[in-house]
Amino acid sequence: MSLQVLAESTDDNLDIEVLRDVNGLTEHTSWAHGGMEFMGEYGMFAVLAVLGLLAWWRIRSRPDHVAAVAGLVWAPLAALVAELANAPLRDWVDRPRPFLSHDGLHVLVQGKTDPSFASDHALTTMALAVGILLVDRRIGVLAVLAAVFTGFARLYVGVHYPTDVLAGFALGALVALVGSMFVGRLLEPVVRMVERGPLRPLVTAEPRPAG
């Protein structure tokens, strides 16, 4: 799909058709509007924070706890880097929000007038989720599901096209994966230094060696 098509989506393409199908669920699920709006806008970040804390608690007991903690520290940094990378992309594509170009959408989140592509919520949650997945597979799978739910919620509330969400997922995952191969290792000396100091419990569950 070309950038021009992204910026000027018509009612004839699959992108808007899928959006209408998902957003159309709002007509029969009024009881879920408030919850979907909150979870899609803010709530899943809290869920991911809790999952990140659970992963941190688990990895502190592992033999490779230094590398694992360094990898987990990279997760929020990856989300920030993905956001920064998306800023010029968003302005370059300059795709209007779907409700500005198409009638009949039920928009549950008001005031969204910035460009639509790519979804910041999708890329941020996926960067966090992949960062967690790389250090704790079990908790990471739950985190990825939380990110996918966020993408679904952004369609449900009518503020993004499916391709906005998919592009956000791809960018967030790419930044988390590529960065983990470099930044995670760079963070390990810092984590080792913390392990030797009074904040040792942040890195490992093992007691400080005697002497």
Image (tube, helix red, strand yellow):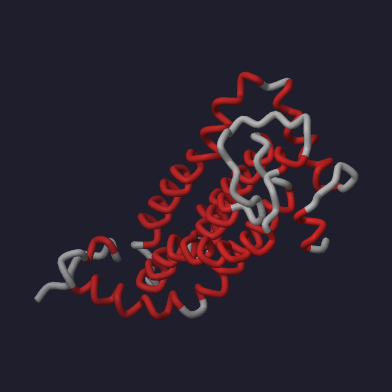
Residue at image coords 50%, 73%: 180
Taking the image as shown, residue 58 lies to the left or right of residue 142, namely left
Q: Is residue 61 left or right of residue 46?
A: left
Q: Position of residue 95 (x, y in %)?
A: 70, 53
Q: What is the quadrant of the N terminus in the image?
A: bottom right
From what the image shows, is residue 130 above or below residue 103?
below
Residue at figure coordinates x 77%, y 56% from the top left: 6
The quadrant of the rendering that contains the C terminus is bottom left
Q: Is residue 105 left or right of residue 138?
A: right
Q: Residue pushed farthest right?
A: 12
| Point 77% across, 62% down: residue | 3
Looking at the image, is 199 positioned above or below residue 100?
A: below
State whether residue 64 appears in this view. yes
**Towards the viewer: 134 or 75:** 75
Residue 29: quadrant of the picture = top right
Question: Which quadrant holds residue 155?
Answer: top right
